[in-house]
Image (cartoon, rainbow, N blue to C red):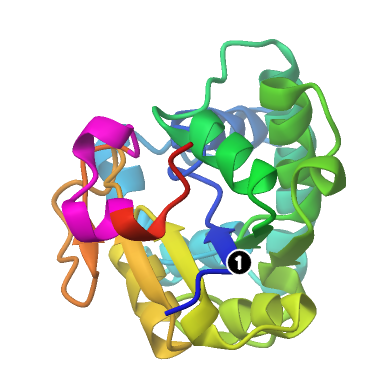
Amino acid sequence: MTLRALIFDVDGTLAETEELHRRAFNDTFAAEGVAWHWDRDEYRELLKTTGGKERMLAFAAREAITFDAEAAARLHKIKTARYADLVDQGGLQLRLGIAELIDKARAQGLKLAIATTTSPQNVDRLCHSCWGRAADEVFDVIAAGDQVARKKPAPDVYQLALQRLGLPAEDSIAFEDTANGVRSARAAGIRVVVTPSMYSGSEDFTGADWILPTLSRANWTADLADLLPAA
């Protein structure tokens, strides 16, 4: 393959953000008088449903709670603002190897893209927190979940990223942290590196081309090192 682009998931892949998302959900529920509270075990299970609005709807359906898409959209808007506040308080750090890989990829002329189920606003907030720059100053393309008909594990968001990059799947490598993300990338025909996050370590990553603890170069296999920019 001729590597021309790296495509990254966001939550759990670029940074361990899911604890902040869980806290933002719980803060929103409390502030809005919704008698829900998601502990870590509950949230780990709920993360199998991609998308925050979809996650709330899935929880309500499971618990036989009357809750509709309009209510999910309203709460999710509040939750997104709360998440942004939490990110702005600091403490969010890129996972090992991410900053170095992105710097070297940019220096070698590779395209950089995002393919995520989170919102563009959340991507921008993370980039401001971790790079001190807007998302479109770090990444050439940002494809987000609400811009496609189906969220991961469907391939739609990766197909959108490829369309905006103007590249075939074989010219890219995807970086993910979940089984749904792996299935999404592979369904789009993209080879995928998975680095399990704190919430996804027990998932089945069948289909991943590489499974690494982090993207630190010391963890790269020889065949991956031949592909990724290293200098």
Q: Image point 36% across, 45% down: which residue? A: 43
- Amino acid on which the number 1 mark rests in the picture: Phe
- Number of callouts in the render? 1
Secondary structure under the numbered disc 1 in the rendered image? loop
**48 sits to left or right of 141:** left
Q: Quadrant of residue 87?
A: top right
**32 sits to left or right of 1:** right
Up the image or down, 61 lies above or below 222; here it is below
Q: Quadrant of residue 80?
A: top right
Q: Quadrant of residue 189?
A: bottom left
Q: Image point 58% across, 57% down: which residue? A: 52
Q: Image point 78% across, 78% down: which residue? A: 164
Q: Which residues are magenta?
A: 215-225
Q: Position of residue 149 (x, y in %)?
A: 68, 88
Instruction: Confirm whether residue 122 shows in the render.
Output: yes
Question: 4 and 117: which one is in front?
Answer: 4
**SS majority, magenta:** helix
Question: 50 and 171: which one is in front?
Answer: 171
**34 sits to left or right of 129:** left
Question: 109 and 122: which one is in front?
Answer: 109
Identify the residue under disc 1.
Answer: 67
Answer whether residue 122 is magenta in the image. Answer: no
Up the image or down, 50 lies above or below 159; here it is above
